[in-house]
């Protein structure tokens, strides 16, 4: 880059640091909205749903398997993580010992109310793969709030992903790890991938 | 805690002001600084210096958007530290951004005069405000927050390719705007 262009680019970089606070705040808050469907298409889709429902009326009265919201229910995902902890595959750390910036991707979890974190180091490719397969999952009941499992994926460069699916730039040691979302049952593919990682 | 309440703590000279600031904005400021400096120790120092600067500037200052106010301070400190430590060796996020921003510079641009009389700042605010919301967000996240293309893509749930394309077009539009304004 020529010196004059570099100098000009430096001025531009400096001036971009002085833009209106409102623009900065708005960018920080922005979240991409789901596309708004055309009303006509929405109405057509609603009609289709009604038609299909009417055709399938007899099957609507069948009793479906409900998720087990009992206090003793342990999700498959929790079983995978408990297996990692029991087999000494996980390191137990205090919050301040958890390093999100050491270049090593990690799986991190703890139970609400506890102050120790279980940490498993994973490879960068495993981290990327988990992000790709992190599906929408499905909400689980609130019957076991006191045993709520909190789970994060750290990419080793300050990025922290929670199962509410929005990656964040995360905490670098100045306070708590990123806030958790409402309870979510991870998608089966994600659970399978975590199982393979912690048992490898 | 709401921003105005944290600002009140600064005005009351309460030490809780820094604690509450750290609780709410510590991770954001640290990440912004780290993305420029690529060093945790340097980023931590810049964030601590930011808290000190905020303490010294308030009262007098009463920012409405505290996060943006602090971001500007930590960004300035981080870029200055980067320049001080990398006078000869050029690497890292700042260099990439400078390379990209150089594309916006029209040939023969007399930048110093426009920089000094404040026209450039006014033009940038006007230009950024004129962008569509998503494009504006991508532009600010890249060139103010210094986020990588990948992080922007993940945050907005779009492809990295789209981020690249949006930024390229925005830089072209900025260059046209600079030429149109006669800042040459």
Image (cartoon, rainbow, N blue to C red):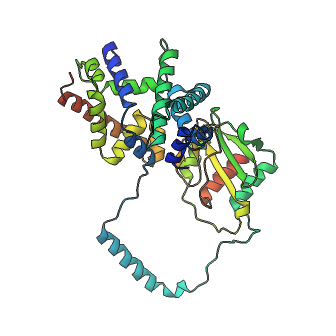
Taking the image as drawn, is residue A90 in sight? yes
Give the residue furthest to the front: B12
Q: Quadrant of the C terminus of chain A?
A: top right
- Residue A62 is drawn in which quadrant? bottom right
Q: Compared with residue B67, is residue A69 higher up or lower down, i.e. above or below? A: below
Image x and y of residue A134, in percent: 56, 53
Image x and y of residue A174, in percent: 63, 38
In terms of depth relative to the viewer, which is nearer, B22 or B159?
B22
Q: Compared with residue A160, is residue B48 higher up or lower down, i.e. above or below? A: above
Taking the image as drawn, is residue B146 in sight? no
Image x and y of residue B103, in percent: 31, 26
Q: Quadrant of the N terminus of chain A?
A: top left
Q: Look at 49% across and 46% down and name the residue there.
A: B4
In terms of depth relative to the viewer, which is nearer, B99 or A88?
B99
Q: Compared with residue A22, is residue A51 higher up or lower down, i.e. above or below? A: below
Q: Is residue A148 left or right of residue B51?
A: right
In terms of depth relative to the viewer, which is nearer, B49 or A131?
B49
Q: Look at 34% across and 27% down and name the residue there.
A: B101
- Residue A173 is drawn in which quadrant? top right
In terms of depth relative to the viewer, which is nearer, A91 or A96?
A96
Image x and y of residue B113, in percent: 26, 19
Q: Look at 42% across and 26% down and name the residue there.
A: B96
Give the residue furthest to the top: B88
Q: Look at 49% across and 86% down and name the residue there.
A: A57
Q: Compared with residue B182, is residue A73 higher up or lower down, i.e. above or below? A: below
Counting every numbered tag in the picture gives: 0
């Amino acid at each position: 880059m020529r010196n004059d262009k570099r100098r000009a680019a430096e001025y531009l970089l400096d001036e971009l640091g002085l833009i209106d606070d409102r623009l900065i705040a708005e960018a920080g808050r922005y979240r991409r909205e789901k596309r708004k469907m055309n009303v006509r298409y929405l109405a057509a889709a609603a009609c289709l749903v009604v038609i299909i429902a009417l055709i399938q009326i007899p099957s609507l009265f069948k009793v479906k398997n409900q998720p087990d919201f009992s206090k003793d229910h342990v999700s498959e995902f929790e079983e995978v993580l408990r297996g990692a902890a029991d087999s000494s595959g996980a390191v137990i750390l205090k919050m301040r010992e958890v390093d999100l910036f050491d270049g090593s991707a990690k799986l991190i979890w703890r139970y609400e109310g506890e102050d120790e974190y279980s940490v498993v180091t994973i490879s960068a490719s495993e981290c990327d793969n988990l992000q790709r397969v992190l599906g929408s999952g499905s909400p689980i009941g609130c019957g076991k709030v006191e045993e709520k499992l909190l789970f994060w994926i750290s990419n080793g460069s300050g990025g922290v992903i929670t199962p509410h699916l929005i990656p964040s730039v995360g905490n670098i040691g100045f306070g708590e790890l990123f806030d958790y979302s409402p309870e979510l049952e991870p998608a089966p593919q994600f659970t399978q991938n975590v199982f393979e990682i912690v048992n490898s | 805690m709401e921003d105005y309440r944290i600002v009140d703590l600064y005005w009351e000279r309460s030490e809780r002001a820094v604690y509450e600031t750290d609780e709410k904005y510590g991770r954001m400021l640290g990440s912004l600084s780290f993305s420029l400096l690529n060093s945790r120790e340097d980023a931590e120092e810049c964030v601590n210096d930011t808290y000190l600067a905020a303490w010294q500037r308030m009262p007098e200052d009463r920012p409405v958007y505290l996060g943006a106010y602090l971001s500007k301070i930590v960004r300035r400190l981080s870029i200055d530290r980067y320049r001080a430590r990398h006078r000869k060796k050029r690497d890292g996020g700042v260099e990439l951004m400078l390379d990209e921003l150089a594309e916006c510079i029209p040939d023969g641009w007399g930048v110093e005069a426009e920089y000094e009389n404040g026209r450039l700042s006014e033009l940038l605010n006007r230009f950024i405000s004129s962008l569509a919301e998503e494009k504006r967000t991508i532009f600010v996240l890249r060139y103010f927050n210094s986020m990588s293309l990948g992080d922007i893509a993940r945050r907005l749930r779009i492809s990295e390719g789209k981020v690249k394309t949006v930024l390229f077009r925005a830089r072209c539009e900025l260059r046209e705007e600079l030429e149109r304004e006669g800042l040459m």
